[in-house]
């Protein structure tokens, strides 16, 4: 990951900070204890518990480095920066699928917070890119593998 700016909402910042704190204070200790116990079993050259614990330790340390870098390069979107006139990062947008009439509500977030299963879409996703900077009532076209979907922006909230 390069030193590119990571855009986060306040919630996203808190989640990353909580994950980092948990990895440093809880997970590191747990894996160190697992390594200590595995070493107690004797020969570590054919000790799967030791191997698993070392692999987990490497994963945890890698994730800590990634999170620290993300937090160093974070730009926090404050609630007062969110405009309800145009779609921006931090906006919650209601869109209507013009073909099927379905409405969906998406929170527009930076890529680090993206969670499509919880309707948090990245500003760099196809839908995010299409609606970013647009106003209520605008119809946008989103290119997806199945073709083109037309959405109408119904509402923009903080």
Image: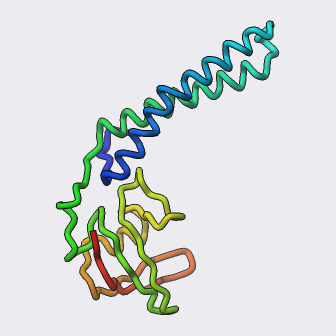
Identified at 20% across, 69% down, the residue is 83
Q: Quadrant of residue 71?
A: top left
Say whether residue 59 is left or right of residue 1.
Answer: right
Residue 52 at what x, y percent from top left? 71, 26
Position of 6 relative to 52 (above/below): below
Where, quadrant-wise, is the N terminus in this rendering? top left
Number of marks present in the image shown: 0
Identified at 43% across, 63% down, the residue is 120
Position of 33 relative to 97 (above/below): above
Q: How is the image coloured?
A: rainbow
Position of 57 relative to 16 (above/below): above
Say whether residue 39 is left or right of residue 146.
Answer: right
Q: Quadrant of residue 27?
A: top right
Say whether residue 39 is left or right of residue 26.
Answer: right
Q: Residue furthest left?
A: 80
112 and 150: which is toward the camera: 112
Where, quadrant-wise, is the C terminus in this rendering? bottom left
Identified at 43% across, 32% down, the residue is 21
Identified at 36% across, 56% down, the residue is 110
Position of 23 relative to 9 (above/below): above
Residue 140 at what x, y percent from top left? 35, 83
Residue 109 at what x, y percent from top left? 36, 60
């Amino acid at each position: 990951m390069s030193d590119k700016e990571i855009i986060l909402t306040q919630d996203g910042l808190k989640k990353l900070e909580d994950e980092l704190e948990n990895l440093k204070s809880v997970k590191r200790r747990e894996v160190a204890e697992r390594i200590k116990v595995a070493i107690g079993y004797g020969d570590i050259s054919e000790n799967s518990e030791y191997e698993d614990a070392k692999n987990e330790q490497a994963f945890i340390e890698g994730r800590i480095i990634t999170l620290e870098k993300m937090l160093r390069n974070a730009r926090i979107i404050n609630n007062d920066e969110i405009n309800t006139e145009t779609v921006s990062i931090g906006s919650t947008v209601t869109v209507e699928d013009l073909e099927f009439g379905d409405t969906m509500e998406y929170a527009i977030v930076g890529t680090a917070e993206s969670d499509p299963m919880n309707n948090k879409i990245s500003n760099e996703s196809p839908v995010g890119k299409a609606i970013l900077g647009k106003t209520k009532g605008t119809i946008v076209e989103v290119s997806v593998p199945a073709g083109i979907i037309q959405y109408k922006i119904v509402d923009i909230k903080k």
